[in-house]
Every structure is written in structure tokens, then in C-alpha cells.
Amino acid sequence: MIREALSEAQVVLSTNTGAADPLIRRTCCFDLVIIDEAGQAIEPSCWIPILQGKRCILAGDHCQLAPVILSRKALDGGLGKSLLERASSLHNGLLTTRLTVQHRMNDSIASWASKEMYHGLLKSSHSVASQTLADSPVVKATWITRCPLLLLDTRMPYGALDTGCGEQIDLSGTGSFYNDGEADIVTQHVLNLVHCGVSPTAIAVQSPYIAQVQLLRERLEEYPGLSGVEVSTIDSFQGREADAVVISMVRSNPLGAVGFLGDSRRMNVAITRACRHVTVVCDTSTICHSTFLARLLRHIRRYGQVKHVVPGSLDGVSGLGFSQPTLPSIS
């Protein structure tokens, strides 16, 4: 019955490795093989379906997350470079068709990605270029809901670290970093958005660190009205979108160590999940030690708003309680 269904089907869906199933290999010879999210697939897995078709289309973005490779030896051997990335550089790019108009993001968000990741080629459709959260008839028009880019800076005046927003390591569990103060600020900001009428299901909270994700889930679960807000790692949210994205960067230390936050592809994924609003919560005195992230901070300063904030300083009703910081480190 399965063999008959496969032989009669016009389209067969499977994972790359699923295409190795003997029923598929013995029954089907495809006119066209399309591999989606090819930028995140290791090359050997792509050849499984490719060899079963006459033509192949690799769809994806090699400027987003690369294949996950745990072996240093395999990484050094080139397994971390996807077939999509390798093919895009062949024959002076003649094999590549670039999609240069995006239909997701406010242009203040998209213009950063265009400049940093896509050589300035990415343009915004007029249908989304100026969209904000305030466009919805059920959302109150406030400075927050009109703002497509917001930086909540935990850095104290004159660059001192806020002792309530320092990074910590989860030694007893995941071994990854977390930041109690940032978790409080994110929770307060999400409460502000929901109070303004933004649906919890339209909000995604992201962090690169699993310990912070777990902490954020615990904090948000304390508020029944926030049920529906999705909290995840940046990596697990690739390929998806939300009207409002709140990113907790976590790292805050006197050495300026940022770890894998400086990975441009990971940050590209994080920022470009948003349609109408991005909030970055971070300690700028730490984050600006990465030249790539410093450019992101400057972009937000130019095209969005920057507010100094400490845990407990966001008024959950009006969104007030911010003070304007001085930012010599990213000017």
C-alpha cells in the first residue's frame, strides 16, 4: 500500500535522511528535488535526496545558522560549510538566484540585516516597511508600540556594571550562562507589551543560553496573562517569526567577554525573526567589545530608541521609568 501511494504521489515530503528509506529509493525517481533550509544541513545528508532526482533546488540562507557540528576534527575538515554555501560561490554566483525583497520586517530592522549580512541588497516591501505594533486596532499607540527598535541598556552611568544584572553560570545544571536582572527586565517589558494590547502569542522571547531560557520561562509562568509567550533559544527559532521579539543577551562582565554572541549568523537569525518590534536587553559596556555587536548597538541608537533600565524600573502600566543613558562606548 505504501509503495503504491509513493508511486502515484505527485509530491513526496521527507527529511534528508528519511529519503534513504528503501521504499522511497526503490520506488521513486524524482523530476525535481527541493531541499529547504539547506544552509543548516550538513552536505552528506543533502546528497541522499539529490541522487534520487534529475534536478535539485537548494533553498535557504547561508547567512543564517550553519550546520551543527560537534566534532572539531569534522569542523576543521569543512563539514561546517553547507552545500548551499559552497554552491553559491561556484561559477561567480551564476548558480544562485537571490531573493532581494523581504516581506516580513519593518525597514528599520531589515536595514541592519541588509547592511551587515547581505551587502546592502536586501530591500523592504512597501507593505511592511513602516509597520509597527501600534498599527493593530487593539494595540494602544504608545512610544513603545510605535518603536521598531529598542535597546534596554543595563549599564550603569559611566560604564559601571549594575550588580543586579551580572552574568552567572549554572554550575549545577546546564553549565551555561544566565542573568537574573535581565530576566526581570524582560518579564517587565513583556508585561508592558501585553498591557498595551499586544497578544502574548505575538511575542517571542529569545536568548542564546539555555539556562537563561529556562529562567525566563519560570519568570513568565508566574503571570497567567503571559500564557502564550514563546521562550526559546535563538537557534531553535530559526525559520519562524513573531510580531515582537525580545532578546536577552545575558553576558555582563568586566572583561568584555561575549562568547558566541559575536557569531554574526546567530544574531542575524535573532533580529530578523521580528516583524514589527525588536527589543535587545543587554549590558552595552560588555557587548560593545564585539565590533560586530557594537555596530548593532549603533544601528539601534540611530534608528530606534535606547533606554537605561534596571530591574524594577519599568512601570507596567505606562512603560515609563526609563532614563536616557550616555553611550560613549558605542558612539
Image (cartoon, rainbow, N blue to C red):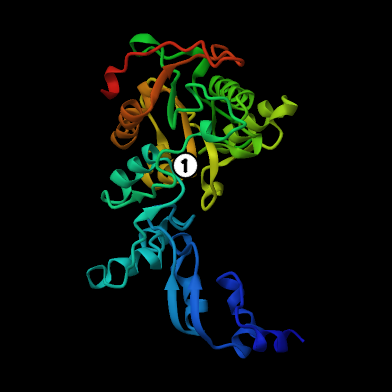
Residue at image coords 27%, 17%:
328
- Is the residue marked by circle 1 packed among few (<14), some (14-19), or many (20+) residues within 10 Å? many
Asked whether 179 or 107 is in front, the reply is 107
Left or right of residue 277, residue 264 in this image: left
Q: Secondary structure at mark 1?
A: helix
With respect to residue 329, does 45 lie above or below?
below
Total tally of numbered discs in the picture: 1
* Disc 1 target residue: 270
**Residue 88 coordinates in the image, percent (x, y):** 32, 66
Left or right of residue 125, residue 218 in this image: right
With respect to residue 44, does 209 lie above or below?
above
**Residue 156 coordinates in the image, percent (x, y):** 41, 12
Residue at image coords 34%, 67%:
97
Q: What amino acid type should be assigned to the residue bearing mark 1?
A: Ala
Left or right of residue 114, residue 43 in this image: right
Determine if residue 257 is in view: yes
With respect to residue 27, does 110 lie above or below?
above
Could you say which quadrant of the image residue 107 lies in? top left
With respect to residue 90, does 169 lie above or below?
above
Residue at image coords 28%, 44%:
115
**Residue 329 coordinates in the image, percent (x, y):** 28, 21
Could you say which quadrant of the image residue 326 lies in? top left
Asked whether 302 or 329 is in front, the reply is 302
Please state, as top left, top right, bottom left or bottom right, where the N terminus lies in the image: bottom right
Can you name the residue that lies furthest to the right here? 1
Please state, as top left, top right, bottom left or bottom right, where the C terminus lies in the image: top left
**Residue 250 coordinates in the image, percent (x, y):** 49, 28
Determine if residue 172 is in view: no
Can you name the residue that lies furthest to the left here? 92
